Image (cartoon, rainbow, N blue to C red):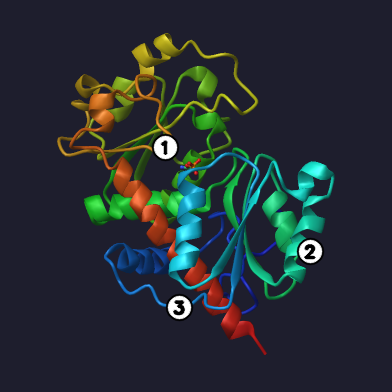
Amino acid sequence: MSSTFSQLDAAGRLRHLVTLDGLPRTLLEELLARAEGFAAGEARGDTLAGITVANLFAEPSTRTRASFELAALRLGAYVVNLDNTLSSRAKGETLLDTVHTLEALRVGMFIIRDAESGVQERVARAVGNEAAVVSAGESHLSHPTQGLLDALTLKQCKGELGALSIAIVGDVARSRVARSAHRAFTTLGVPDIRIVAPRAMMPEASEFAGCRRFDSLEAGIAGVDAVMMLRIQHERAGGGPVDLPAYHREFGLTAGRLAGAAPRAIVMHPGPINRGVEIDPEVADGPQSVIRRQVANGLAVRMAVLELLAGARRARAP
Ligand code: CP
């Protein structure tokens, strides 16, 4: 995000959600508290009644796209989904022209996933005063609602975050999930965040400030309260081809290795999981896995984000 762009409006309310970078702890806590209510079955309400939400996904998605659509519908919005292969962008129209076309159709919220960095900010700068932009994943840089749902899951399972140890394991260098989790956990006061990766998947030293780094899975997860496994991002540039059996031998989370974490450590994974590569089926489906809870929390968090944006929009209305 560039230094001249603000996600907050003049009154400090959330105007867009492009990244968790720079957002105050109080705002993250407000979102998590609201999401906890939705996760507990709190009334859905109609806070998005009359608003049209557009899902613009230029990369594949199952969890994020479905949960944004369900979140919008449960809050009373209209939803349009633009299939990237059918959209005007595939015919040569610029994304901004597509966005302005949708604004003319009174779309008020744009949920955007894109492989290119900076797209969400460009759209946020271009839309009118009433419209909001939410990132559903930006390149390798940012996946803010994933970071929030990971924090919510951690809080539900472990209570206070202020004494926890968390290991983020795998293809950290190419992971937007890892970057947003790091940002969320750091802002919320997690004291021990470790990144665990083979050398080729380790991020630059300038990133992941405050994290301890490990190139051994056993050492990296020793005694931790949560192990967050990552998928290998074959589709992103950087790194060479990965020898998957060798990767599994060194970095695959097996039941035996998990025994080295704290006794009731939870196992997280953003999905989609690759069984037998980064995680063994008996761990992914085992009693310490909270992977499906993360998915469920994705819906609650996205409801909280959309509701907060809609409230801020109402407050700004003349
Ligand atoms: N975790 C995540 O972003 O999953 P999808 O790619 O299925 O949306």
- Element assignment for label 1: loop
Quarter occupied by residue 288: top left
x and y, in percent, of residue 151 in the image: 37, 52
- Element assignment for label 2: helix
> Mark 3 highlights which residue?
46
Disc marking residue 100: 2
Disc marking residue 263: none
Q: Is mark 1 within 8 Å of ligand 1?
A: yes
Q: Amino acid at mark 3?
A: Asp
x and y, in percent, of residue 152 in the image: 34, 55
Mark 1 surroundings: few (<14), some (14-19) or many (≥20) residues within 10 A: some
Q: Amino acid at mark 1?
A: Gly
Quarter occupied by residue 250: top left
Q: Amino acid at mark 2?
A: His
Disc marking residue 271: 1
x and y, in percent, of residue 226 in the image: 28, 39
The residue under the point 30% across, 41% down is 165
x and y, in percent, of residue 61 in the image: 53, 42
Q: Residue furthest right?
A: 92
Q: Is residue 4 above or below residue 167?
A: below
Q: Residue furthest front?
A: 86
The residue under the point 37% across, 37% down is 269
